[in-house]
Image: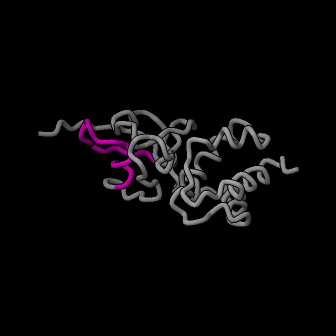
Amino acid sequence: MSLLREIRFRLNGSPVRVSVPVTMSTLDLLREELGLTGTKYGCGEGECGACTILMDGVSVNACLMFAVDCEGRSITTIEGIAEDPANDELRHTMVRHGGVQCGFCTPGMVVQTKALLDGNPHPNRNEIQRGLEGNLCRCTGYKKIVDAVADLAGTTE
């Protein structure tokens, strides 16, 4: 038997109202119930960052959050970032620098980059590396990703 709870929140700028099992993760809500598959399931333990989303502008691991914790919050996924023209430069710079490799970590990296630059528009390379350290790239291509973020931040040397 699963206890359901109705929750309301904003998802990528639009209001959402849905009933969810109290034990459902936010990642499962996004992917399985709402069809937003851009947020990836990686380790399921909050270690890889593939499931990174923004909750009220702060990056969080969707695999570690219960869906009911979205109540009254503003959630932004990679789809929300992709649909916002204000983020065109972010996406294009990642592609231009080869920061989009196999693509598995890319959604989490892009969401984490947005959170980083929203909080610190001009981070140096060390701050970029620290800001992205919760996101693992299995292609081991961090240099291109950091180069892209540094280019966006205008802190390339």
- Asked whether residue 17 is drawn in magenta, I would say yes
Image quadrant containing the N terminus = top left
Identify the magenta region: 14-31
Q: Is residue 85 visible?
A: no
Q: Nearer the viewer, residue 118 or 105?
A: 105
Coordinates of residue 88 in the picture (x, y in percent): 68, 60
Residue 23 shown in magenta: yes
Instruction: Tell me: residue 23, above or below residue 92.
Output: above
Give the colour scheme of this rendering.
one colour
As drawn, is 135 to the left or to the right of 94?
left
Residue at left 34%, top 49%? 28
**In the image, what residue occupies the spot 57% across and 54% down?**
137
- Residue drawn 60% across the image and 45% down it: 112
Taking depth in this image into account, of 19 and 135 the one nearest to the observer is 135
* Above or below 74: residue 99: below
Q: Position of residue 113 (x, y in %)?
A: 65, 47
